[in-house]
Image: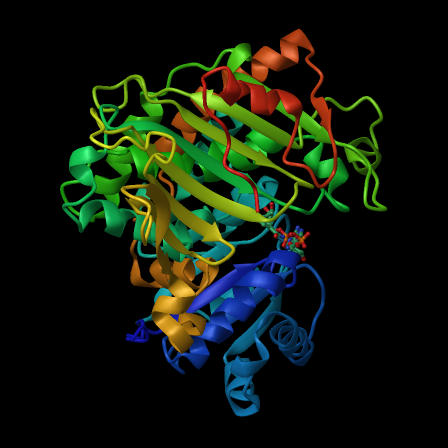
Amino acid sequence: MVSRVIPVDPFDLVIFGGTGDLARRKILPGLYRRFEAGQMTADSRIIGAARGDLTEDAFRALVAESIAEFVPKARQDKAVIGAFLQRLHYIAIDAKGDGGWAQLKEVQRDGVVKAFYFSVAPALFGDIAERLKSHGIAGRDARVVVEKPFGRDLASARALNETLRQHFKEDQIYRIDHYLGKETVQNLMAVRFANILFEPLWKAEYIDHVQITVAETVGVEGRGAYYDTSGAMRDMVQNHLMQLLCLIAMEPPYHFDPDAVRDEKLKVIRALDPVGPDAIVRGQYLAGGGQGGYLDDSENPDSRTESYIALKAHISNWRWKGTPFYLRTGKRLRARASEIAVTFKEPPHSIFDDAEGWRENVLVIRLQPNEGMNLMMMIKEPGPGGMRLMQVPLDMSFADALGADHEEVPDAYERLIMDVIRGNQTLFMRGDEVEAAWAWADPIIAGWETRADRPQAYDAGSSGPEDALMLLHRDGRRWREIR
Ligand code: NAD
C-alpha cells in the first residue's frame, strides 16, 4: 500500500563530514535504505568529504559498518549493500585549507543533481561555501543542506544566513529540521487540510488548549560541555517544538507549495506574544537510576542551563486569541514520548445527566512511539445502566493501519534527503523563519539570564519539575501523562 517508490533523478551528493557521527548514524544508512527501496538510481554517487586520509575502501568499510549497525536486519541484503558501496567515493578535504578541493572539482560531472550536505560544525559553513564557489564546484543549480544548530541567537543566525547567502540563493539552501521529515508531522497537514472535519473547529472558539510534548529518557550523555552552551530552549523549543506549533496553528496555505507553506508558518511565529517569567518553568534533572545528575554531566557545578523547559505561549491573531499553547520538553523523563494534543472545548449545552462521565474531545497526534493519531470521543457506555457516557479512542496507529508496509515508511532523514534531490523545500526552514523564531526566543532567554534564575531540580525518571504541573494547574488544566 505504501511503497509507490518513484526513483529520483541521478545525483551527486557530497557529504562534508562524511565520517562524522551524524553521517554514520543517519545520512548514510538512510541513503542505503533509499537505494534498497529503488529510489536512488545506480548512476548516482555519494562522495564522502572529510578530514582524515581514508582510502575509498576504508570509507566503504566504515559505511558498511554503519549499515550493519543502524539499518534493520531485515533490510540488509548483502548484494544490495555491495552495489550501494560501489556508489561511494571518498575525498580527504580540508574545509579551511586547499587540500582536496581540486580533486573534488575533477570528479564533478554534468547532467546530474548536485547537492552538498554540510554535516560539519556551523563554524565551517562559510569556509566550505566559499571554496565550493571559488573552485567552481557549485553553480546556480547546486543545493546545500545545513544542519542544526542554526545559530544560538538572532545575531548568530543572521550571520550564518548572510554567510550562506553570499554564495547561494535562498532557493538553494535546505535547512534541516528533522522533525518536519517525520511521517506524522506531515500527516498533521493532511489531516488538517484534506478533511473538512477539523478545520471549521480549528480555532479559539472550539479549541480549549494545545499541548506539545517532546520527552526524552536520555540525559546529555557525553555532550555535556556542548549542551551547557545550549539548553532545552535553544536545542529543542526554538526549532523542533516551534515547527510543530506552526503546523498546528498556521492558516491554510493556498497550495502545498514551499513558499506558500513557509509564509503561513512565518506569520504564526511573528504573531507569538512575548513569554514572561510566570509562564516559564525550567528544570535540571537530578542523579538517579545509577546515573549522575545534570550538574555532573555538564561538568559545571554552577550551571544554570536547563535540561527541561515548559512554557505557555499565546498567538495574537484572530484565530487563536485566548487559546494557550503549552510546550514542554526535557531529558531524563519518565518515557520517550512526543505528541501534540489538541483539546476541544465542551459542548455548549449537555442534554445528558451523566456530567461526571463527560470528558473533552482530544485529538492526539503521536510522533513517537507508535506513530499515529487518536481522537478521544464520547460514546454511550455499552450495556444496560441507562445513558452513561464513556470516552474511547478512535485509534489510527500507523503500524496497524499499514501492516507490514509500515516498515517501508522512510525515516525523517531519508525523506528529507530525497526532497533535497527532488528540489522540494516545503519541509525545510526558510532563513526568515529561523530568524523570526530566534527573535521570539532571544528575549525569553535574556530574561532568565539577567535574572540569573536557577532551574528547578527534578527527579530522573519523573515527568519534570513540580512547578511545571502548577503552570497548568493555575489555569485549571493538567498535562497529559508522559508514557
Ligand atoms: P562529528 O564531530 O562526529 O563529525 C564531524 C565531521 O566533520 C567529521 O567527518 C570530520 O572529519 C569533519 N571535519 C571536521 N573539521 C573538518 C575540516 N576542517 N575540514 C573537513 N572536514 C572536517 O560531528 P557530527 O555529530 O556528525 O555533527 C555534524 C553536524 O551536524 C554538526 O553541525 C552538528 O551540530 C549537526 N548535528 C548532529 C547531530 C548528531 O546526531 N550527531 C544531530 C543534529 C545535528
Q: Is residue 207 visible?
A: yes
- Counting the numbered discs, the total is 0
Of 350 and 441, nearer the camera is 350
Please state the horizontal and vertical placement of residue 406, each as a whole percent of the image: 41, 70
Q: Is residue 176 visible?
A: no
Residue 227's place in the image compared with 79, above or below, is above
Please state the horizontal and vertical placement of residue 38, each as a whole percent of the image: 38, 80
Identified at 35% across, 31% down, the residue is: 432
Query: Which part of the image, by quadrant, shows the N terminus?
Result: bottom left
Identified at 60% across, 40% down, the residue is: 123
Residue 201's place in the image compared with 301, above or below, is below
Identified at 63% across, 36% down, the residue is: 463
Please state the horizontal and vertical placement of residue 394, each as a whole percent of the image: 32, 53
**Residue lying at the far front of the rendered structure:** 385
Of 149 and 118, nearer the camera is 149
Of 138 and 442, nearer the camera is 442
Q: Quadrant of residue 165?
A: top left
Residue 207's place in the image compared with 189, above or below, is above
Of 31 and 332, nearer the camera is 332
**Residue lying at the far top of the rendered structure:** 451
123 left or right of 117 in image? right
